[in-house]
Image: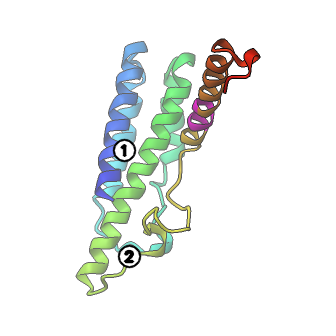
């Protein structure tokens, strides 16, 4: 969970850097989202396993304010940032839940946080990885076929 948390932090930093490269007028609205998320995560309430994916109450409306204050060419990057923030919140809550269980003497992992080596695909969240893998496999097949054609397939060489 900690490695996923670090990955989320890096992804969010990259998204913000990409957004700032275009325009930074979205920043005041994003600061409001930041304050709400910090308040939500610093709460001392007990986390139940079925509440692991809960978000702050104003998450959607606050992020809509960020979208409204951004330029049209920033919308896709903002959607990606929103996804990264959502995953960050879920990872923080998962870590809190695991720590809460450890303090109660329960050393088992919650069912929703089981490692990816299991058959349960709960943690596979990014379909973009599958798309990039499929596209790269297609390109590799095209390049290999091109080399085969150029290298003498008419003469029967394999």
Whether residue 101 is situated above or below residue 22 in the rendered picture:
below
Magenta extent: 131-136
Crowding at mark 2 (Cα within 10 Å: few <14, some 14-19, many 20+): some
Whether residue 42 is situated above or below residue 28 in the rendered picture:
below
Could you give the CA–CA distance between mark 2 and mark 1, rounded to whole angstroms? 21 Å
Q: Nearer the viewer, residue 131 or 101?
A: 131
> In the image, is 100 to the left or to the right of 68?
left
> In the image, is 60 to the left or to the right of 95?
right
Q: Residue furthest bottom?
A: 105
Q: Label 2, on which residue?
A: 109
Tell whether label 1 touches label 2 (CB within 8 Å). no
Q: Label 1, on which residue?
A: 8
Q: Nearer the viewer, residue 122 or 153?
A: 153
Q: Nearer the viewer, residue 148 or 74?
A: 148
Q: SS for tag 1?
A: helix
Q: Earlier in the sequence, mark 2 or mark 1?
A: 1
> In the image, is 154 to the left or to the right of 60?
right
Q: Quadrant of the C terminus?
A: top right
């Amino acid at each position: 969970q900690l490695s996923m948390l670090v990955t989320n932090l890096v992804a969010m930093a990259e998204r913000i850097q990409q957004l700032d490269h275009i325009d930074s007028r979205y920043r005041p609205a994003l600061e409001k989202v930041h304050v709400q998320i910090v308040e939500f995560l610093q709460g001392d309430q007990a986390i139940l396993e079925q509440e692991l994916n809960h978000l702050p109450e104003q998450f959607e409306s606050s992020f809509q304010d960020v979208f409204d204050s951004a330029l049209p060419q920033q919308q896709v990057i903002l959607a990606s940032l929103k996804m990264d923030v959502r995953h960050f919140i879920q990872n923080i809550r998962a870590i809190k839940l695991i720590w809460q269980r450890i303090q109660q003497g329960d050393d088992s992992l919650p069912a929703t946080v089981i490692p990816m080596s299991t058959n349960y695909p709960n943690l596979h969240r990014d379909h973009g990885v599958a798309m990039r893998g499929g596209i790269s496999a297609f390109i590799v097949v095209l390049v290999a076929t091109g080399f085969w054609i150029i290298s003498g397939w008419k003469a029967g060489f394999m």
